[in-house]
Each structure stands twice: as C-alpha cells, then as structure tokens.
Amino acid sequence: MTKTIAWTFVAAVTLAAIACQAPSSRRNEEPVPREASQEEPGTDSETATVPESRPPADSESGAVLSAGTPEAPVDDVDRTATELPTIDADESHSRVLSNDGAYLITYASEPETLPLNEPFSIVVRLYRPETGVRIEDSAVRIEADADMPAHRHGMVRVPKVTKTGPGEFRVDGMMMHMPGYWQLYVDVIHDGITERAQFDVDLD
C-alpha cells in the first residue's frame, strides 16, 4: 500500500514537471518567417495593368519617333516617264521606211543644203512605224554611208556616229566629192540584225 502511494506521487510530480517545461521549449523556438508575397500591397493580380510602352524620343529634338513603318523620303523630282518625241516634230526632215518596215527613219543635214566636196553632218532619228514614237533602246545603233550607184563607188571618208539621245544619232564627217545622184544609207543594227534605209540625194 505504502509503495503504491509513493509511485503515484512520483508519477504526478514527473507529469507536472513535463507540463511546466513544454511551454518554455516552445517559447525558445524561433518563429519561422512567413514566405514573402510576390504581390505588392494593394495590388490585385487580376486587375493589374501593364504600363503602356511609349516610342523612343529623338535625343536632340525630344520629339517622339513613330513606332510604325518609316515614311518614304519625299522626292522632289517627278519620276513619271517623259513622253518620247513623235515623228510630227520632224516635219521638215527627210523620212523613209526601212527596207523591212521595222523602222521609220528621218534625217536632216547640217548645213541644210548639202555641199559639194565638203564635210557635212546629219542628224538621224529612229521611230516606230506603227505609232510614230521615237525608239528608246540603248541596244540600237546605226552606221551611215553614201554611194553613187552609177559610178559604183562611195565616199572617200569614213564618218563618225555619236548617239545624242533616245533614238537620235549625229553623223559627222560625211562628204560627197562628186556631183550627181547619190544614195545615203542608214543601217540600223539591233541584236545582230541589220536593216537598211536609203535616201535619194541629187547633188549639183
């Protein structure tokens, strides 16, 4: 009986000691910091708006530069194609159709009256027969010469041809050294094909 009371007393004292130490150990534990919120106070994640981005400003003028496609520079020069001259501008010039009909050719001499046995020049222009519009093709070139069919000889000089514009050529160094009937030849050359035109000249 006495032993039972003693063990009961010891058990009660032990439980009381344990009950007193438990709060103390909990007080000594360091509080675990709460995980920081990723949202700033007062900000609703559902209603938050992204700040509007502004186009960059010019560092010198401060003007806001357009974020769109830059405008093309204004060209003061009118790029529309200029109309080519027509055969009507050469009313006073001699004209003839080439032998195969591909070119309408005019010429005018400088001086206007062909001299005998003296150098002169001619201006040759090429037109399209169907429209009368000047031919504009950098691949087209000409050669010029003259011949006396009755005497079966030509000029004693070789003329020089210079292109002076679209479908326009100047021929210098022409000379007809005898009076009589001459044929002035203009050969148009394009893509390896030569087409000739003849002008009749009576030289006194």
Image (tube, grey):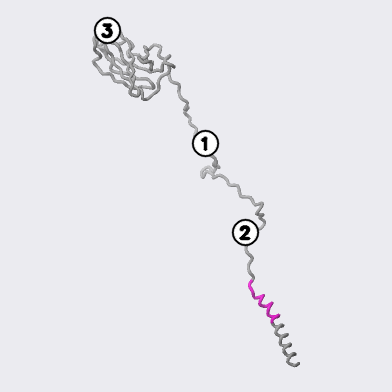
Three-letter residue code for mark 2: Gln
Q: CA distance from mark 1 to mark 3?
A: 68 Å
Query: Of the residues tagged 1 and 3, which is closer to the observer?
Result: 3
The crowd level at tag 2 (other Cα within 10 Å; few <14, some 14-19, many 20+) is few
Q: Report which residue position mark 1 lands on.
A: 71
Three-letter residue code for mark 3: Gly
Q: Report which residue position mark 2 lands on.
A: 38
Q: Which residues are magenta?
A: 18-30
Rendering coords of residue 186 (x, y %): 32, 16
Rendering coords of residue 22 (x, y %): 68, 78
Horizontally, residue 45 falls left or right of residue 134, namely: right
Three-letter residue code for mark 1: Glu
Q: CA distance from mark 1 to mark 2?
A: 44 Å
Q: Are the residues at dot 1 and dot 3 in contact (C-beta closer than 8 Å)? A: no
The crowd level at tag 1 (other Cα within 10 Å; few <14, some 14-19, many 20+) is few
Res. 89 mark: none
- Determine whether the residue tagged by mark 2 lies in a helix, strand or loop: loop
Q: Nearer the viewer, residue 151 or 124?
A: 151
Which corner quadrant of the image does residue 110 belong to?
top left
